[in-house]
């Protein structure tokens, strides 16, 4: 038989209800204060003589309502209660039909039990579990906010409703979460005075669902109660040497609106207000209505609308005496330096001057005018650009802000006579070698001071001069006098002056020198005795040595019969460059050879090479004995096919001579691949032959 009426019991973890009747269940009269933790949604299944599903809700008052879905008889309502022991009783449909579900709930919210239908004598079991609550409480209403003090605001609101039950409320202040409470009121403390704060509240249920925020309400804290400010302390009074007094104190209050400064000429009475300051000020400078060399007493009080603080301590200071004109300098003397310069010296007798004035006149008693001012502490001055052979009178006074002191004594000096002028000229400018010559007419009597000072500038004709030649204090009276120096390309300025017994003369005229080329090119010709071609007409007996060799360069075919097999081993050339290039930079070196006789197979291409010899070859060189040469100092060039001059770049070899890496014993000329004398002779080229009247080999060097 099938279940006709099914009562679904729902058990909730830890949920207890007061006793209920065992037959048809009704609403309990009371509920435990802990029921909120069991409130929620549940679902499950039943089986046995009938089967299906069920769902329902446990409410905060301990009642249950829901439905069952039978697979055979359809859908029915459920209602029931849970008692304090965790046992549940529920009926299906209307009360009194005897159909029930009975069971228990465990600590995890799982439900199990049995069901029974007395009419059909059907029975079975059921199970279920708690499901999540997703319904948020309703929005909080009737929110109010009221200021209680300068630091506290109280807020209240109406309790919110929820499908299961509200468990707490969240409070937000100025849009930021403040705290959570369980009641419908709260106090916000620790606030700032006279400040507006706005609040919103939300409701929470046991499942954590949060309602929408309530409407915002605002309140402003009360103003703080005014109290008399704390008194300032540590008052000090100081002077800075001027007729004013500087006050400083410590501000000990946080609520003052300002300070009152009082002054008196007595320590204990007669104080009057001299100034009011703003809040937080801790200093004041008093310079109004006070006298020099007088003592004043001060005190300070803090004020606000609530009243005045106690006075600070009393402080005093004495103003400085009025300033006076400085003491006059003394001991002025004047000394002649030259025909255009006089130097003054004096004694400074004051400590309060701001400087000195120097006056000059052509008369001892009148006509003085200021020619210079000198800074504090100065005791000398040099007067320049004066006229020669002229007496000048001087006096000096100290000055400050008050006025000018008395004058010193009057001192005088006469400038020297004008010296004879000195003239400078450029006498040579060749490839960076400059010769300057100057003329000066010396007096009859000389001195050990005599001499010259030559100066050079690379900046301009008027500035940047440095001394490059100096014979002063040597007695040098040579005139005219010349000096030679070397310079790179550029523009240079020169001037000269003489030193005499009376000092330096005026400078000469300025000479401008422009150096446009510092490189030197020289050509060296080899002497006939310094070149040699070694050869013989018989390979088996050839042993020609230097004394009997020919003055030729290359392989000479012109001796003897045309078909005689003349063999050549080497051609040697020596150019005497002396010390011209020692230590110099070689920009270019070219060896020029002049072909005279061409022989051999012209269809065959081959090279000659030039090498730097490192042995003295003048003593003995034979046709089949090669001189020693620097392997790294060779230069190759192709066999000429015409009698046009042949130029060989030997820059690196000559640079090695100039740098002393190679010794200059000349050049060694030979076929690039020296096989044997007989074969070499077939590749003969005569570059120079004195019988043919050809040009001598030439070496052209450009160096710097």
Image (cartoon, helix red, strand yellow):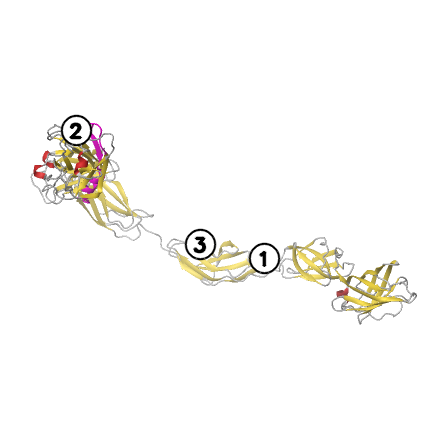
Q: Which residue is mark 3?
A: 285
CA distance for labels 1 and 3: 26 Å
Q: Residues within 10 Å of mark 2 (few under 14, many from 20)?
A: some
Marks counted in the figure total: 3
Q: Nearer the viewer, residue 537 or 634?
A: 537
Q: Which span of residues is magenta-colored?
A: 638-662
What x and y, as percent, mark residue 540?
12, 39
Q: Secondary structure at mark 1?
A: loop
Question: Residue tagged by mark 1?
Answer: 305
Specify whether residue 556 is in view. yes
Q: Nearer the viewer, residue 548 or 112?
A: 548
Q: Picture quarter containing residue 390?
A: top left
Question: Residue 693 location, x and y as percent?
Answer: 12, 27
User: Could you give the CA–CA distance between mark 1 and mark 2, rounded to whole angstroms?
Assistant: 128 Å
State the residue position of label 2: 597
Q: Is residue 343 magenta?
A: no
Disc on res. 342: none
Q: Which of the two discs, 3 and 2, sits closer to the camera?
A: 2
- Which numbered disc, 3 or 2, marks the residue that appears first in the sequence? 3
Q: Secondary structure at mark 2?
A: strand
As helix, strand or loop, the secondary structure at mark 3 comes to strand
């Amino acid at each position: 038989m099938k279940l006709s009426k099914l009562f679904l019991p729902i058990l909730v973890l830890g949920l207890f209800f007061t006793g209920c009747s065992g037959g048809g269940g009704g609403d309990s009269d009371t509920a435990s204060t802990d029921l909120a933790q069991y409130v929620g949604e549940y679902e499950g299944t039943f089986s046995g003589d009938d089967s299906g599903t069920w769902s329902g809700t446990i409410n905060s008052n301990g009642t249950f309502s829901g439905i069952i879905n039978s697979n055979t008889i359809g859908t029915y309502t459920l209602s029931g209660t849970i008692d304090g022991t965790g046992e549940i009783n529920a009926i299906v449909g209307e009360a009194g039909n005897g159909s029930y579900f009975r069971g228990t709930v465990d600590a995890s919210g799982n439900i199990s039990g049995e069901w029974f239908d007395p009419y059909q004598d059907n029975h079975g079991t059921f199970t279920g579990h708690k499901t999540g609550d997703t319904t948020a409480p309703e929005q909080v209403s009737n929110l109010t906010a009221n200021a209680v003090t300068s630091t506290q605001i109280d807020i209240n609101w109406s309790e919110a409703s929820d499908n299961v039950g509200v468990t707490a409320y969240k409070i937000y202040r100025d849009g930021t979460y403040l705290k959570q409470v369980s009641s419908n009121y709260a106090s916000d403390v620790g606030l700032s005075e006279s400040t507006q704060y706005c609040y919103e509240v939300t409701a929470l249920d046991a499942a954590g669902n949060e309602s929408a925020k309530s409407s915002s309400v605002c309140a402003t804290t009360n103003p703080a109660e005014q109290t008399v400010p704390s008194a300032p302390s540590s008052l000090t009074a100081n002077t800075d040497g001027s007729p004013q007094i500087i006050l400083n104190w410590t501000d000990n209050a946080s609520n003052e609106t300002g300070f009152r400064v009082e002054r008196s000429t007595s320590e204990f009475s007669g104080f009057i207000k001299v100034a009011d300051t703003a809040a937080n000020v801790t200093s004041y400078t008093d310079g109004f209505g006070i006298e020099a060399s007088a003592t004043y007493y001060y005190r300070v009080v803090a004020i606000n609308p609530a009243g005045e603080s106690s006075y600070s301590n009393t402080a005093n200071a004495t103003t400085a005496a009025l300033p006076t004109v400085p003491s006059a300098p003394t001991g002025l003397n004047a000394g002649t330096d030259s025909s255009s310069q006089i130097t003054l010296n004096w004694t400074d007798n004051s400590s309060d001057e701001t400087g000195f004035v120097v006056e000059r006149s052509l008369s001892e008693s009148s006509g003085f005018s200021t020619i210079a001012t000198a800074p504090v502490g100065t005791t000398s001055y040099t007067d320049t650009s004066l006229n020669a052979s002229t007496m000048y009178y001087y006096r000096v006074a100290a000055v400050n802000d008050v006025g000018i002191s008395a004058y010193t004594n009057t001192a005088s000096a006469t400038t020297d006579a004008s010296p004879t002028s000195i003239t400078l000229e450029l006498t040579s400018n060749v490839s960076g070698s400059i010769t300057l010559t100057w003329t000066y007419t010396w007096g009859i009597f000389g001195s050990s001071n005599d001499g010259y000072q030559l100066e050079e500038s690379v900046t301009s004709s008027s500035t940047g001069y440095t001394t490059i030649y100096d014979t002063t204090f040597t007695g040098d009276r040579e005139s005219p006098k010349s000096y030679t120096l070397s310079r790179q390309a550029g523009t240079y300025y020169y001037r000269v002056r003489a030193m005499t017994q009376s000092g330096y003369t005026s400078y000469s005229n300025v000479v401008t020198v422009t150096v446009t080329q510092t490189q030197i090119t020289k050509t060296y010709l080899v002497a006939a005795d310094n070149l040699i071609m070694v050869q013989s007409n018989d390979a088996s007996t050839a042993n020609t040595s230097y004394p009997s060799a020919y003055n030729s360069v290359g392989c000479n075919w012109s001796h003897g019969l045309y078909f005689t097999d003349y063999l050549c081993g080497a051609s040697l050339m020596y150019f005497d460059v002396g010390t011209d290039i020692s230590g110099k930079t070689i920009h270019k070196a070219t060896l020029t050879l002049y072909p005279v006789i061409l022989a051999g197979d012209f269809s065959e291409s081959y090279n000659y090479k030039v090498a730097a010899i490192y042995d003295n070859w003048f003593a003995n060189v034979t046709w089949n004995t090669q001189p020693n040469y620097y392997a790294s100092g060779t230069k190759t060039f192709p066999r000429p096919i015409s009698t046009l001059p042949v130029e060989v770049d030997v820059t690196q070899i000559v640079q090695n001579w100039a740098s002393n890496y190679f010794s200059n014993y000349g050049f060694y000329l030979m076929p690039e691949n020296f096989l044997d004398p007989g074969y070499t002779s077939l590749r003969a080229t005569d570059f120079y032959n004195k019988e043919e009247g050809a040009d001598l080999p030439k070496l052209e060097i450009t160096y710097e």
